[in-house]
Image: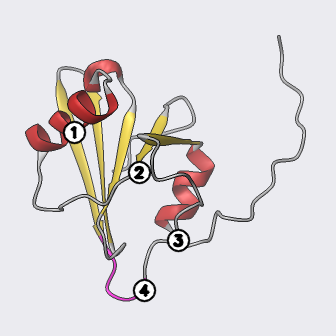
Amino acid sequence: MFGLGTTHHFELYSKPTDMRKSFDSLRGLVINNLDQDPDNGTVYIFINKVRNKVKLLHWQSGGFILYYKRLETGTFDLPKYDSEIGSLSLSYAQLILLIDGISITNLTHKKRFKKA
């Protein structure tokens, strides 16, 4: 069950990550490299150097949830960003496109009404 949605905030970690890392090691990356609190409900996205594996770390109701996907063929197509930044914010739609293997590099957002 994929318990994530549009109400969540998503951060793509900018550096390749060793996929042997689990809950505590990924939590340490968030604390030490991003200077953020991983217990704040943000979903942190980690991708390996080959770009065929992704992990999502999410704090929910008293514990961490770790989602993990490995592609049998192909790679995840990441958006272009400055590698010096710690992380890149993604929308839920961008996350789903990334996970489904659809390129999010050339997407443009149409203006939508937002209630103030």
Could you give the CA–CA distance between mark 4 and mark 3, rounded to whole angstroms? 9 Å
Residue at (52% x, 64% y) in the render? 78
Could you give the CA–CA distance between mark 1 and mark 4, rounded to whole angstroms? 26 Å
Q: Position of residue 62 (x, y in %)?
A: 17, 20
Q: Disc 3 designates what residue?
A: 77
Q: Earlier in the sequence, mark 1 or mark 4?
A: 1
Picture layout, residue 57 above or below residue 48? above
Q: Earlier in the sequence, mark 3 or mark 1?
A: 1
Point out the stretch of residues depicted in magenta: 70-74
Residue at (62% x, 50% y) in the render? 93
Picture layout, residue 85 above or below residue 48? above
Picture layout, residue 7 above or below residue 62? below
Identify the element where label 4 is drawn.
loop
Could you give the CA–CA distance between mark 3 and mark 1, rounded to whole angstroms? 22 Å
Identify the element where label 2 is drawn.
loop
Q: In front of the other: label 1 or label 4? A: 1
Q: Which mark is residue 14?
A: 2
Residue type highlighted by circle 4: Gly
Q: Quadrant of the C terminus?
A: top right
Q: Which mark is residue 29?
A: 1
Label 2 crowd (10 A; few <14 / some 14-19 / many >=20):
some
Q: Position of residue 51 (x, y in %)?
A: 37, 72
Q: In front of the other: label 4 or label 2? A: 2
Q: Which mark is residue 74?
A: 4
Q: Earlier in the sequence, mark 3 or mark 2?
A: 2
Q: Earlier in the sequence, mark 2 or mark 1?
A: 2
- Counting labels gives 4
The magenta stretch spans residue 109: no
Task: Left or right? Give the position of 85 relative to 15.
Answer: right
- State the residue in front, 51 or 95: 51
Could you give the CA–CA distance between mark 3 and mark 2, rounded to whole angstroms? 13 Å
